Image (tube, grey):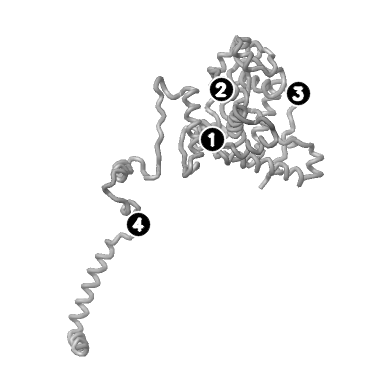
Amino acid sequence: MLARFVDFCIGRRGLVVTVIGLLTLLMLGAASRIHVGTDFGDLLPRHHAYVEVHNRFKATYGSSNAVTIVLEAEQGDIFRTDFLERLRTVTLELRKVDGVNPEQIISLASRKIVDVRSSSDGLESRPLMFPEVPSDAAGLADLKGKRVGVPGRYGSSWFGLLVALHTAGLTLDDIEVVEIGYTQQAALTTDKVDAVIGFSNNDLVQFQLAGVPVRSLLIAGGTPPLVGASLITTRAYLDGHPDVVRGVAQAMVAGINEVASDPTGDRALEATAAQVPGLTGETLEAARLTLKATVLVMTDDQLHTDGTVDRATWQAMGEFMLGAGLLTQTPDIDAAIAPEVLAR
């Protein structure tokens, strides 16, 4: 049988080669139309209600893994401090949801949404609404002729007031400064003052816990020209004990990131309760709210910090304090900071 097949192929080799060539061409044409790929959608039950909804809207949203959350203003437009604060809160809280990639959250309150402005020096890009909502300069301007309470004419609160006045285009002559010590809540609720200078992770939290409705205004848009609490030492000690200073700084940064990584705050509060008797009940919940507000101040939009010293912010603070008469000469910024301590 095999011998006869071989004789046939040899005897009619021209025909056999032609037939094989034609079949090869046909198969090459069919192979060119073959699509090799894996479509996850083909593995889903097409007639399931969820799958039908997905197929209906996937082209609109571009992905089956995207979730759109819409906040709508019931009255007026969205360009109000209270509405933007709510939008910011939703954006920050979404980062704590399991399965959410913080890098892919797009919102007016995200670091990725920037305001790009051009000048003779080039292009300047700043986050539109990060880490805080834009300062309400018009609201700050309402302080004109009002009584503003501060602990005293010193320290962070005093500097914050000067920045707020600068933002609003006002001066100290436009307001009545009332020194109230550390009684912001009592002074405001008893009408001793019309406004107080306080901290978002302290005074504002206390007002919220007391159920006192207040209007919170940022002292400046973007990054205020003030540097927060820092690790401070002398240049002589730093030069003599660089490893000690670096170790303390690294430990502080690690501690902040560890606290920020726990959205409940339980680990930090449990460790604190072991050292602070009586941290229970309402006191514990107050501490939790304070901790949550403090984490937002100490970290970026990813709830993380690398402890980097930003020279530009220090420079802006030096220039502001000099212009406000708080300094008598231009400060030597490079002598005041040590970015090399946490340099990578």
Pointer 1: what residue? 125
Q: Check residue 342 in the rendering and tell me which mark sits there, or answer none.
A: none
Depth-wise, is mark 2 or mark 1 nearer the camera? 2
Locate residue 185, reporting x and y percent. Answer: 62, 17
Depth-wise, is mark 4 or mark 1 nearer the camera? 4
Question: Is residue 295 in view from this perspective?
Answer: yes
In terms of sequence position, does the residue under pointer 1 or pointer 3 come before the other? 1
Locate residue 69, reporting x and y percent. Answer: 41, 34
Locate residue 335, reporting x and y percent. Answer: 75, 36
Q: Amino acid at mark 4?
A: Thr
| Disc 4 to disc 1: CB gap under 8 Å | no
Question: Is residue 174 in view from this perspective?
Answer: no
Could you classify mark 3 by the number of other residues whose Cα lies within 10 Å: few (under 14), some (14-19), or many (20 or more)? few
Q: Amino acid at mark 1?
A: Ser
| Disc 4 to disc 2: CB gap under 8 Å | no
Q: Nearer the viewer, residue 98 or 152?
A: 98
In terms of sequence position, does the residue under pointer 4 or pointer 2 come before the other? 4
Q: Amino acid at mark 3?
A: Thr
Could you classify mark 4 by the number of other residues whose Cα lies within 10 Å: few (under 14), some (14-19), or many (20 or more)? few
| Disc 4 to disc 3: CB gap under 8 Å | no
Pointer 2: what residue? 208
Pointer 4: what residue? 38
Q: Amino acid at mark 2?
A: Gln
**Number of numbered discs overlaid on the protein picture:** 4
* Location of residue 149 by image quarter: top right
Tell me which residue sits at (63%, 10%) in the image: 192
Tell me which residue sits at (72%, 22%) in the image: 326
Q: How far apart are labels 4 and 1 at the CA level?
A: 41 Å
Residue 19 lies left or right of residue 250; in this view the side is: left
Pointer 3: what residue? 328
In this rendering, the answer to whether 216 lies above or below 271 is above
